[in-house]
Amino acid sequence: MPKAELHIHIEGALEPELIFDRARRNGLTLPYADVDDLRGRYQFTDLQSFLDLYYTGMNVLRTPEDFTALTEEYLTRAARQGVRHAEIFFDPQAHTSRGVALETVLDGVEAALADSRRRFGVSTALIACFLRDRGPEEAERTLDELLAHKHRVIGVGLDSAELGHPPADFARVFSRARQEGLRLVAHAGEEGPAEYVWQALDVLGVDRVDHGIRAVEDTELVRRLARDRVPLTVCPLSNVRLRCVDSLSEHCLPRLADAGIPITINSDDPSYFGGYVGDNFAEIERELGFDTTALREFAVNSVEASFLPESERERLR
Ligand code: ADE
Ligand code: ZN
């Protein structure tokens, strides 16, 4: 089934094997015995417990070649699971804050994206996410830096620790990004309340909501998302692993889909959550009993919710 992936953090595709490989190349010592020891630590209690390991893991990414290797590995795996278009998140501040230049990240990632269509059959776009727990002023400075490379990203997003960092704090930086012609997305309603989803819509004016699952707690909000056909990029395995839902069989995704919200299925941070996008499709089929028609609809939604121009969507239908 051809599909688009719209919610994938490239740093979350960093497999333990590549962490060890890059540590060796960069002369870094890791505080883990081996790959199994590291993977064994991927037991999360909430979003923050994951983010701690996620930011530590990406510390091995230093050179453009590190980012190229990471991106090539993602594209290889995604292509095998039917991804034909990927809108890839990256976290500029997670690198610039530890002395790795934005150019290093962009040059490295883009080296892999440049011939992705030919090598992997995957078209791509990049979305730069602001780390909400580093505050709106740093986000503004990050946007200033990004605007020097405006042609290289299609949009901006908002991620990292959600609770206590409401979308409304980022009204100004999102308004500037919009004026610059960038597309807008934001993580909201993953761990945070439905109120954050309202803010993502009404204050930031996002084109899509990343996660958005806690919208299910607010009937009026569910009606709004359905009426305006606002896509949600749902990440089922992530939600289970970060304990945002108790189990996959109790996931609210069928309720959101039944209400008429365009739902897409995505992997979020596949190396940490035990599966790429095809694995997410397989698991929801098994645990939630979706039939082929329903699964196909999620795949179609992903193409319609993408930022691809109409002329390029035909390839994916
Ligand atoms: N950064 C990477 N994965 C994330 C997630 N699931 N939520 C918020 N920020 C993230
Ligand atoms: Zn995410």
Image: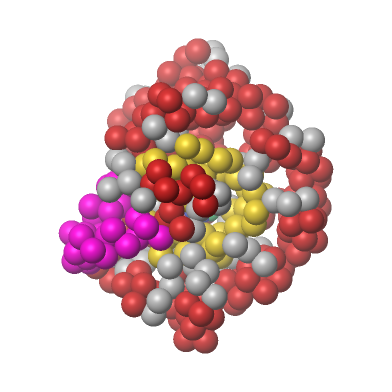
- The answer to whether residue 253 is magenta is no
Picture residue at 28% right of the left edge, 71% below the top = 250
Which residue is nearer to you in this view: 191 or 127?
A: 127
**The magenta segment:** 276-301
Instruction: List x then y, in percent, for residue 186.
Output: 60, 59
Q: Is residue 191 left or right of residue 167?
A: left
- Is any part of residue 43 visible from this angle? no
For the point 31% across and 42% down, the residue is 82
User: Which color scheme did the rendering employ for the protein?
Assistant: secondary structure
Whole-percent x, y for residue 192 in the image: 54, 68
Above or below, 293 relative to 77: below
- Between residue 282 and residue 115, name the one nearer to us: 115
Q: Is residue 229 left or right of residue 105?
A: left
Residue 169 horizontal side relative to residue 250, left or right: right
Q: Position of residue 214 (x, y in %)?
A: 47, 73
**Residue nearest the observer in this picture, 140 or 174:** 174
Whether residue 297 appears in magenta in the rendering, the answer is: yes
Relative vertical location of residue 279 with respect to residue 203 in this rendering, above or below: above
Residue 89 in view: yes
Residue at x 73%, y 52% (from the top left corner) = 181
